[in-house]
Image (spheres, helix red, strand yellow):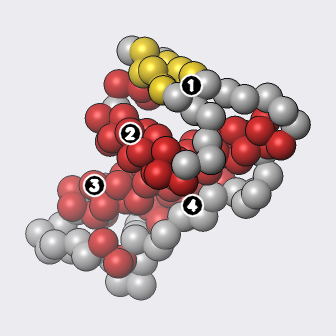
């Protein structure tokens, strides 16, 4: 953040830098880079105690967006790679505590609708298990 937000001020989403997904086009998966990015933002603002609640929420949204982008990108890449070697995945199960997140569930539904629109896709359905 260029200028730390005040405790009473509104936080513009543009003040939180976008977090990148590590290893683009690779099947590597890691949240350590996202964790480090969050730490840099917090430290750059003088610590969490010096950040407004709006700034903390904006930071959490940015983290969540990047984390979910990583999940969908890596699953998409894995499904494509399976297909290239003749493995046709027809079902996908998302489970665990993170599967309860409504934002992630909506993103999965959007992802599945998108790949069905492409037409050349074998994924028939996905299941979210909480």
Outermost residue, left side = 8
> What's the residue at 25%, 76% (across, down)?
12
Residue tagged 4:
37
Give left or right: position of 111 versus 4. Answer: right
Q: Is residue 16 above or below residue 54?
A: below
Looking at the rendered structure, the secondary structure element under dot 1 is strand
What separation in Å lies between label 2 and label 3 (alpha carbons)?
Answer: 24 Å
Residue tagged 3:
57
Mark positioned earlier in the residue sequence (2 or 3)? 3
Q: State which mark lies toward you, 3 or 1.
A: 1
What separation in Å lies between label 4 and label 1 (alpha carbons)?
Answer: 30 Å
Residue 65 in the image: x percent, y percent? Answer: 43, 54
Is 118 or 2 nearer to us in this picture? 118
What separation in Å lies between label 3 and label 1 (alpha carbons)?
Answer: 31 Å
Evaluate if marks 2 and 4 touch, with contact meaning CB atoms under 8 Å apart. Answer: no
Residue tagged 1:
92
Q: Does the image show residue 15?
A: yes
Mark positioned earlier in the residue sequence (2 or 1)? 1
Outermost residue, top side = 130
Looking at the rendered structure, the secondary structure element under dot 4 is helix
Give left or right: position of 15 versus 79. Answer: left
Outermost residue, right side = 85
Mark positioned earlier in the residue sequence (3 or 1)? 3
Mark positioned earlier in the residue sequence (4 or 3)? 4
Residue 127 in the image: x percent, y percent? Answer: 45, 21
Residue tagged 2:
109
Residue 73 in the image: x percent, y percent? Answer: 61, 50
């Amino acid at each position: 953040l260029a200028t730390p937000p005040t405790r009473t001020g509104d936080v513009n989403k543009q003040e939180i830098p976008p977090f990148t997904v590590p290893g683009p086009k690779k099947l590597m998966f890691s949240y350590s880079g996202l964790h480090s990015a969050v730490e840099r933002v917090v430290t750059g603002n003088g610590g969490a105690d010096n950040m407004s609640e709006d700034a903390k929420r904006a930071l959490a949204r940015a983290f969540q967006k990047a984390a979910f982008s990583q999940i969908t990108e890596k699953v998409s890449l894995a499904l494509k790679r399976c297909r290239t070697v003749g493995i046709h995945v027809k079902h996908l199960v998302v489970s665990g505590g993170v599967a309860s997140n409504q934002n992630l569930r909506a993103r999965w539904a959007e992802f599945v609708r998108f790949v069905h629109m492409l037409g050349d896709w074998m994924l028939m359905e996905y299941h979210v298990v909480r």
